[in-house]
Image: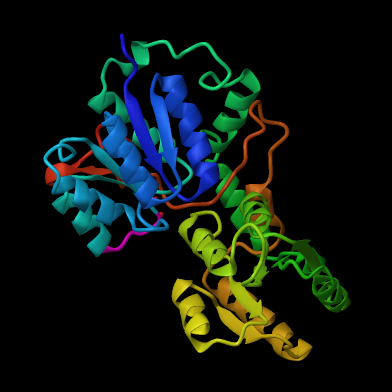
């Protein structure tokens, strides 16, 4: 039996790799793309059985691409799953209007996608993947994958303990993540913060900083704009789309003087914006301000939140734990039909 093809388009390369592994194990031939134009070309060439699209991508968004497919008689019948961190009514409305399925990006994204794949291709799980290194993930890779997809979860007892621990976090356990490729600047900030009892960790590239924020959430993030492997605006958008990192206050500190950039960063969710050089006391006041605001909103600051994102070495999977809203369904299908029967947030 021929293996069906799926096109996965998202500029989040980490997520693409994870979904690719899962879909190949599921029996699909996977075509991936990091931008809308490449995705369109692959859709036109392969005529896939299913398409998974992110909303915000280079060279056009996933919703625009879906609307183009809806106007093309050769592509209109291909099922499309929209995965996004956006939860606004307009995004959901456009999904419904184009008969696309909406799935919010969250730790349990795979359990929400899998039932849809089974619905569109009911026989796919009975198809054996090709036995080669490119399509069959190793046991080690699949364990790592399960740690991300299946184990990014929390139970009520753990969350309650974390909330109790957070009521009186130790003052010497505060720390800041500085995502800046200027190592000397980061070192000077590290000494300043250390004098106030706050530890600072430096990531010198955009994506390494994002991964650090994901695996071990800090009390606040200091974010540069011009960096290798991910500009500041891209990293900020990724942080705010991710359920685990969206509530971490981000203070932008950049050498670029630009009012349009400042507006853009605020619109993306920055808590504060400074242009280098910035006086230390102003930066410290901004940090204490955003930290106090986060605490007043019930955010878990200090050891408990870090414990919830750390790898639990005592568990069989080495599972990472994270905090998020309840696993209410946010996957909806054409005609406003909810998929709650098959599927357990963006």
Magenta residues (range): 85-89
- On the rendered image, what quadrant is the N terminus found in? top left
Q: State the image quarter where residue 26 is shown.
A: top left
Viewer-proximal residue among 47 and 98: 47
Considering only vertical position in the picture, is 286 above or below 205? Answer: below
* Residue 33, percent from left and from top: 43, 43
Relative to 299, residue 9 above or below: above
196 relative to 175, above or below = below
Residue 95 placement, left or right of 174: left
Q: Nearer the viewer, residue 142 or 46?
A: 46
Q: Is residue 116 visible?
A: no
Q: Position of residue 66 (x, y in %)?
A: 24, 49
> Residue at the location (79% across, 67% down)?
200
- Residue at 69% across, 38% down: 312
The question of residue 314 being in magenta is answered with no
* Left or right: 221 in relation to 337: right
**Residue at coordinates 62% horizontally, 76% vertically from top-left?**
251
Q: Is residue 262 left or right of residue 58?
A: right
Instruction: State whether residue 67 appears in this view.
Output: yes
Spot occupied by residue 340 in the image (x, y as percentages of width and height):
26, 38
- Name the residue rendered at 24%, 26% in the picture: 119
Residue 185 in the image: state x and y as whole percent.
81, 75
Q: Quadrant of the C terminus?
A: bottom left
Vertical arrangement, residue 280 with respect to residue 133, above or below = below
């Amino acid at each position: 039996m021929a293996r069906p093809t799926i096109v996965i388009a998202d500029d989040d390369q980490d997520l693409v790799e994870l979904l690719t592994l899962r879909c190949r194990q599921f029996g699909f031939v996977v075509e991936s793309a990091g931008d809308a134009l490449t995705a369109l070309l692959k859709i036109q060439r392969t005529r896939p059985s299913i398409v998974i699209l992110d909303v915000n991508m280079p060279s056009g968004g996933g919703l625009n691409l879906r609307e183009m497919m809806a106007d093309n008689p050769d592509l209109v019948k291909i099922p499309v799953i929209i995965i996004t961190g956006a939860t606004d009514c307009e995004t959901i409305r456009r999904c419904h209007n184009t008969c696309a399925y909406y799935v919010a990006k969250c730790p349990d994204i795979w359990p929400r996608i899998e039932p849809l794949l089974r619905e569109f291709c009911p026989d796919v799980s009975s198809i054996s993947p090709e036995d080669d290194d490119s399509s069959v993930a190793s046991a080690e890779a699949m364990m790592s994958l399960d740690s991300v997809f299946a184990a990014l979860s929390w139970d009520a007892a753990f969350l309650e303990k974390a909330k109790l621990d957070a009521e009186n976090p130790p003052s010497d356990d505060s720390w800041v993540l500085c995502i800046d490729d200027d190592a000397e600047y980061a070192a000077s900030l590290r000494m300043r913060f250390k004098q106030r009892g706050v530890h600072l960790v430096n990531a010198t590239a955009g994506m390494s900083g994002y991964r650090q924020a994901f695996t071990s959430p800090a009390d606040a993030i200091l974010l540069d704009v011009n960096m290798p492997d991910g500009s500041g605006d891209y990293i900020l958008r990724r942080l705010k789309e991710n359920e685990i990192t969206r509530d971490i206050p981000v203070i932008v500190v950049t050498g670029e003087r630009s009012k349009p950039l400042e507006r853009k960063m605020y619109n993306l969710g920055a808590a504060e914006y400074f242009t280098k050089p910035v006086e230390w006391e102003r930066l410290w006041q901004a940090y204490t301000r955003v930290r106090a605001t986060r605490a007043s909103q019930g955010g878990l600051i200090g050891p408990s939140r870090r414990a919830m994102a750390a790898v639990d070495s005592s568990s069989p999977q080495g599972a990472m734990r994270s905090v998020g809203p309840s696993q209410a369904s946010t996957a909806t299908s054409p005609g406003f039909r909810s998929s709650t029967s098959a599927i357990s947030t963006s």
